[in-house]
Amino acid sequence: MQNRIIKRCLQIIFFLVLTSSLSGCMYWVRAYQVYLQMDEFDRNFSVVANDEFTLQFKNPILFSKDFVSLSRLYASQDDLTADGRRWRYWFRKVDGNNKLLEPEVKFYSDLNFNKESRLIAWSFSSLFLAIAPPKFLEVSLRSIGGGEIDKEKQQLKANTAFLEKISDALPKKPAVLAQLGEPFEIKDEPEQEVYIYRFLLETHHIDPGYEDRALNEVKITFDKKTQDLIKMAGSFAGLKVSINYRKFQDEAPELSSR
C-alpha cells in the first residue's frame, strides 16, 4: 500500500513537470493522463471482444486532433456516426515496392469519437486478432498501468508483474499464414523463424517529412518446434507495439510513438 502511494506521488510529480515543460504540446499531457487512468483499468475502460476487439473509454480524455498531432497521419475514412465520428485506418499488404498484393490482405483500426471529439472507443478488426489474440491484447493493455516511461525514446514498457498467466493456447503458424499469406521476408534463427510482412496505410494526406510512417512492418515470430506464434512486433500509424506471448510475464509489451 505504501509503495503504491509513493508511486502515485511520483506519477503526479512527473505529470506536473511534464505539464510545465510541454505547454505547447498538450496532446502529450492528455496522453499521459490516459496512462494514469490505466492504473484503475476497470474504472476507466472496458473491453468488448467478438469479431472485433474494442477498448472502450469510460472517461474520455484524448481528442481527435491529438492523433493527428502524434502520428502526422490521417485516417483512410472519416464517417459521421450517431455518437460523433469514426476514423477508420486501412492497412493493406504490399510488396517490396509498396504495390498492393493479390489476393488482397487487409485489416483496419477504428477510432470512435463523441460529439466533443473525444476518443470513446478504439477497435481492431478480426485479421489483426490473428496476430494479437484478444486475451493477450487485453492483458497487454492492462499491464500498461504502472509501466516504465522512457522519455528519451518516447517508449512505454508495460508492467506484467502482477498479472496472471494466460492459459489459452497460442495460434499455430499454419493458422496465421492462412490469414496473412506469404510474408515479404523470412529470417531463419536457431530456434525460431521471423516472418516479416509489410502493410501500407491508405490515407489521403501525410504531413511532409513523415511519409515513412505510412509503411508498417510487422514481424511475427514462430517457435520452430511447436509452431506457436510467440511474438508480434510492428508499427501501426505511428504506434509501435511489441508483445512477447509465450513469456508474457517475463518480457513486457512495449508501446511507443514513432
Image (cartoon, grey):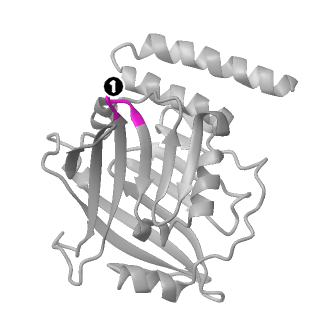
Q: Residue 186: name its quadrant.
A: bottom left
Q: Nearer the viewer, residue 198 or 201?
A: 201
Residue reaching furthest to the top: 20
Quarter of the image for the N terminus: give it: top right
| Residue at 77% in and 48% down | 161
| Residue at 27% in and 36% down | 68
Q: Secondary structure at mark 1?
A: loop
- The answer to whether 72 is drawn above or below residue 4 in the figure is below
| Residue at 44% in and 78% down | 195
Q: Is residue 29 magenta?
A: no
Can I make out residue 146 in this image?
A: no
Q: Kindly identify the amino acid type of the residue bearing the numbered disc 1.
A: Glu
Residue reaching furthest to the right: 1
Q: Position of residue 84 (x, y in %)?
A: 30, 36
The span picked out in magenta is 114-119
Q: Indicate left or right for 95 with 135 as reference.
A: left
Q: Is residue 117 magenta?
A: yes
- Which residue matches tag 1? 116
Q: Position of residue 237 (x, y in %)?
A: 32, 50
